[in-house]
Amino acid sequence: MRIDLHTHSRASDGTQTPAELMRAASAAGLDVVAITDHDTCAGWAEAERAAYDVSITLVRGMEISTKFRGKGVHLLGYLPDPTYEPLVQGLVRILDGRNGRVPGIVERLQGIGIDIAEDDVHRLAGDPAAVGRPHVADALIDLDVVVDRKEAFAKYLNPGRPAYVNRYAAPLEEMIATVAGAGGVTVVAHPWGRGRAEDLDEAAFAHLLEVGLSGIEVDHQDHDASSRTALRGIARNLDLVVTGSSDHHGAGKVNHELGCNTTDPEEFDRLLERARAAAGASGRGTPEVLTR
Ligand code: AMP
Ligand code: ZN
Ligand code: FE
Ligand code: FE
């Protein structure tokens, strides 16, 4: 049984439609796949239909932009009731920040002499629910300013680069509680990606467990072997669920192919158990994963 719990579609910054993503997941030999677009459930309905057609089990999820001790943390939320008002409001606030940021980024790029318009970004992105820097990167590729997203981030879009603009992210503890209130469960995505080990240490995870966190994404391309071993140890000590995933973005990110990391079926069962408990406690959400 092959389980991949973190993937993106064109509902955010992946390059495949939700249906294409489900077909690719099936073709890659996955049995279970989660769709986890940034800050939105907009891809769920299409993914559900396609997952049914290709007989793959779909886990409805999202990757939520949060902040912890002043730094960005990506929080994976699985199986929440997407109509739970505090969750809806939290996501609206994040998405407003995403939309509001695009004009500022474009203006900064124009300021350093790049001939780009807001419309270039929106036209290529195809109006995703969650617009992000990767879509600006795609416009820069189309304009022959850079060759790939990686170069666009390194030269223009990363913090400290000329076109960087900050945006709103939800407080991490608050969002863990909000997803729990929606009957879902949460897993911290790639906690030690890009040099984050000093903030999210065992004491921090113990604190997050207390506010309702269910798991840690240990097996991720941003983690080297020693980070994975250390994070696995923390998860074991705290009885947190260990997940593994590709963080697939279609053609938008190299070395993140579907199934390049997977989640142990026993760990997946533990995650579903916690989802059932959260759904029961909140009277919301649904532990059901969609399967044929
Ligand atoms: P944003 O959502 O606008 O904050 O952009 C952050 C997203 O951009 C991340 O979640 C990644 O999916 C993507 N990203 C960040 N760095 C890179 C990179 N070097 N190459 C490709 N995609 C990236
Ligand atoms: Zn992304
Ligand atoms: Fe992420
Ligand atoms: Fe991601």
Image: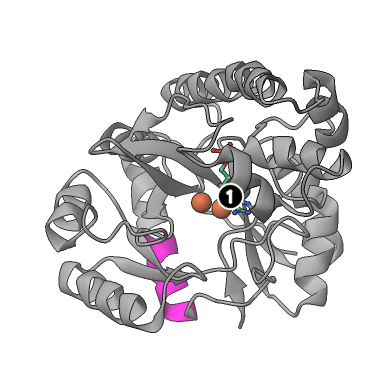
- The quadrant of the rendering that contains the N terminus is bottom right
Q: Amino acid at mark 1?
A: Ala
Instruction: Answer left or right for 205 relative to 35.
Output: left
In which quadrant will I find the C terminus?
bottom right
Residue 49 visible at all: no
Magenta region: which residues? 265-273
Residue occupying the far front of the picture:
113
Query: In this rendering, does residue 193 appear at all?
Result: yes
Left of 118 or right of it: where is 74?
left
Identify residue for label 1: 154
> In the image, what residue occupies the spot 68% across and 75% down?
31
Q: Nearer the viewer, residue 51 or 261?
A: 261
Q: Residue furthest left?
A: 203
Question: Can you give x and y, in whole percent of width and height, for residue 194 in the image?
Answer: 41, 58
* Numbered disc 1: secondary structure: helix
In the rendered picture of this protein, how many numbered marks are placed on residues? 1
Main secondary-structure element of the magenta-colored stretch: helix
Say which of 137 and 86 sits in front: 137
Does the closest atom of ligand 1 sit within 8 Å of the Cβ of label 1?
yes
How is colour applied across the structure in the image?
A: one colour
Write the residue at 85% across / 32% down.
126
